[in-house]
Image (cartoon, grey):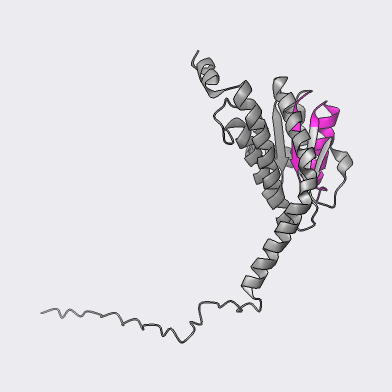
Amino acid sequence: MAVTRTSTVPAARAVPDPEVPDPEVPGPDASGTDLLAAGRAVLTEHRAVTDASEALLPIAAAVAGEIIACYRRGGTLFSFGNGGSAADAQHLAAEMVGRFRRERGPLPAVALTVDSSALTSIGNDYGFSEIFSRQLHGLARPGDVAVGFSTSGTSENVVSALAAARRLGVRTVLLTGAVTRPEVADHCLAVPSTTTARIQEMHLVLLHLISELVDSWAADSRPADSWAADSAQ
């Protein structure tokens, strides 16, 4: 018996009329908010916080000096935070071990946010508040530097880790926002804002500034060619 084959021709797609709004594509006022105006408001707030944060430059320079002194002693930088602040902590450690802008030898830095086995075992056995402090007790030595990131300044595991670091003779730094307790660290970079996004944006600027200063020192004292020669031996 002959088999009749049929073919289905797909329906032609309608050409959208540029004069008729597509109901599936939201317009600038689809959410009830003018997106351009909202964007301008964000940038205006960002600029205001950036200008106000200029007062933090001497503290940032002091932090860079603290880190440089740590490296001169043969010490290590430890960094930690939660969520977006964990990403900032990892970013800072990466700038130290890798490089920021200049070719130079690697600098010892450890982000305490990356070892999932340590984080989950400590969190399970001792509680989430101990996930950073317990690691510091095992890894840090007097003269090291501990850098905590917390936009609120009240994250229990960050505050606990800074307290543990001080007991160990480790120098401490806190990057935070306007609502904070500066006494929890030797150096406190408190961004003058209560908006989490603006605080995190300035934390990025500050960690880049610190990295720039440390990078400049390291490029002169630990150039890439001498490190390469040492590692080849």
User: Would you say 227 lies left or right of 9 here?
Assistant: right
Q: Quadrant of residue 43?
A: bottom right
> Looking at the image, which residue is at 80% across and 30% down?
171
Q: Quadrant of the N terminus?
A: bottom left
Q: Would you say residue 164 sits in the magenta stretch?
A: yes
Residue 187 falls in image quadrant:
top right
What residue do we see at 87% from left, 43% from top? 182
Residue 113 visible in the picture: no
Q: Position of residue 193 (x, y in %)?
A: 79, 55
Q: Residue at x 51, y 77 (%)?
A: 25
Please state if 224 lies on the left or on the right of 62 as rendered: left
Magenta-colored span: 143-171
Q: Is any part of residue 98 visible from this angle?
A: yes
What residue is shown at x 63% (from left), y 21% (from top)? 221
Would residue 71 appear left or right of 184 to someone viewing this image? left
Percent across and percent down for residue 218 are 63, 26
Depth check: give the residue in front, 31 or 1: 31
Residue 112 covered by magenta stretch:
no
Q: Is residue 208 above or below residue 97?
A: below
> Who is closer to the viewer here, 135 or 175?
175
Left/right placement of residue 63 relative to residue 103 reads: right
Residue 63, x across and y down, in percent: 76, 34
